[in-house]
Amino acid sequence: MTTFLELGLNDWLARQCAAMGLNRPTEIQLNCIPPILVGEDVIACAKTGSGKTAAFALPVLQKLSEDPYGIFAVVLTPTRELAFQIAEQFSVLGKPMGVRVTVITGGLDMLQQGVDLSVKPHIVISTPGRLADHIESCTNFSLKRIKFLVLDEADRLLEDNFGSQLEVIFKVLPRKRQTVLVSATMTETLKQLQDLTMNKPFFWQQEASVATVEELTQTYVLMAADMKDAYLVHIVQSYTEKHPHSSIIIFTSTCKYTQILGMIFGEVGFEVAVLHSMIPQRQRLSALNKFKSNEVRILLATDVASRGLDIPTVDLVINHNVPNRPKDYVHRVGRTARAGRDGVSLTLVTQFDVKLVHAIEAFINAKLTEYKTNEKAVMDILSEVAVARREAEIKLDEQDFGEKKAVIKRKCLLEETKDREVSQKFRKLEHKNKNSRQKSFIKTSKEKSVK
């Protein structure tokens, strides 16, 4: 059995892995840590829960310990929550060497982030948009000396609407650097990148006939569309009675429906955490921390929680809607059955979703099995859940929930514009002071030469 030491990692990193419960390398770690350590670019694709973060964090930390300076590595992620989770792993694994990690995402104070970047942390973990904003508006940090660029969830970064932001970032990065791309799903973009890149990267893809892990039991419940919420409440009630120490993630299609379901569950006696993009960032982090610490056992979320989050107590993932893209299904259900643990996924299927389910089954190369429910118990709570939903919708309409989304978006844009303007003022002031110092120095030098 291969150990972390045999992969070429130092003693202190191997000890830190053992302290975290990482006793032996996973497949992606076994195959990708050695080429990263010898300086190769890497493209890696492995199932969710396979240890991708440690696969790049461990060699980056080892290289950093050999020649520590800031800013040494930049890690880009598509979601804020994933950025904070990666930062936690870097901080824990790098604790013996005192690694300094900074998270740069939207929703938090841009000026404070500028200060954090100016003190040159070792590792910068960021979403593309906010880092691009800092590059365009600040001069108090530089990425010209970075040794590593990591794109986590690379498929989404390269295929979604991050193109212009990535272009801004890539322009200021040095040509001589190591690039690591990791993803849970292989796409045509990643394949083309492998073929077109000038420095042929080391490419590794986990071989598997099924796109999801073996420990995951994938199920469905077929129902009428107007009974979906009642079925959801019944399933959660019966599951929590049988598994009181388990945690559940419920994925929904929109921010508004996430909020509605949160209010429904509150009415029927469940404490839940709600996570979506219309919630301020500090509240999003608070909700996630409550769920991680088991203070709350149920998390209702949009797809902002579908990428990379690793919460060991999650035994059940419920898809309230069937995802339109099969790869989104893979990422959602990957929140359970991680690192060799068992888990269950359950998808609520209506008469309108059958084609989507068939597309998912073709993509993962596996069939979903039926999850047994008690239809009589569903009928008993149908009226109660319907009333709770109507009340929730009325409350949200009274709060102008849809309008609030537009207002929040405008506020964010105004805040970011204000942050840029303030940063530009500071930059102009710094430039002015620098010129004044130079003129003063020249004047003094001339006076001394005359004397």
Image (cartoon, rainbow, N blue to C red):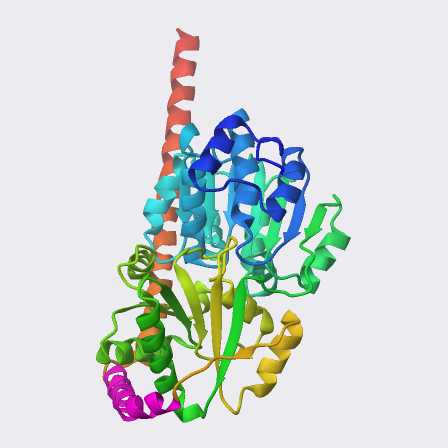
> What residue is at 38 percent from the left and 64 percent from the top?
413
Question: Given the current orientation, which residue lies at the most extreme front position?
Answer: 242
In the picture, residue 202 is in which quadrant?
top right
Q: Is residue 360 visible?
A: yes
User: Which residue lies at the image location 36% right of the left edge and 33% below the top edge?
Assistant: 433
- Most foreground residue, 82 or 379: 379
Above or below: residue 139 compared with residue 331: above
**Name of the residue lying farthest toward the top:** 451
Quadrant where the N terminus sits is top right
Q: Is residue 115 left or right of residue 13?
A: left
In this view of the protein, which residue sits in the foreground, 39 or 54? 54
- Residue 393 colored in magenta in the image: yes
Q: For the C terminus, which image quadrant?
A: top left
Asked if residue 122 shows in the view, the reply is no
Residue at 54 percent across and 28 percent down: it is 10
Q: Nearer the viewer, residue 254 or 296?
A: 296
Q: How many marks?
A: 0
> Magenta residues, as a range?
375-397
Q: Position of residue 133 (x, y in %)?
A: 45, 53
Where in the figure is residue 427, as x and y percent of width and height? 39, 42
Q: Position of residue 158 (x, y in %)?
A: 61, 60
Query: Is 366 within the magenta?
Result: no
Give the vertical position of 333 relative to 437 (above or below): below
313 horizontally vs 370: left or right? left
Residue at image position (30%, 58%) is 294
User: Measured along the vertical axis of the image, is residue 196 above or below residue 432?
Assistant: below
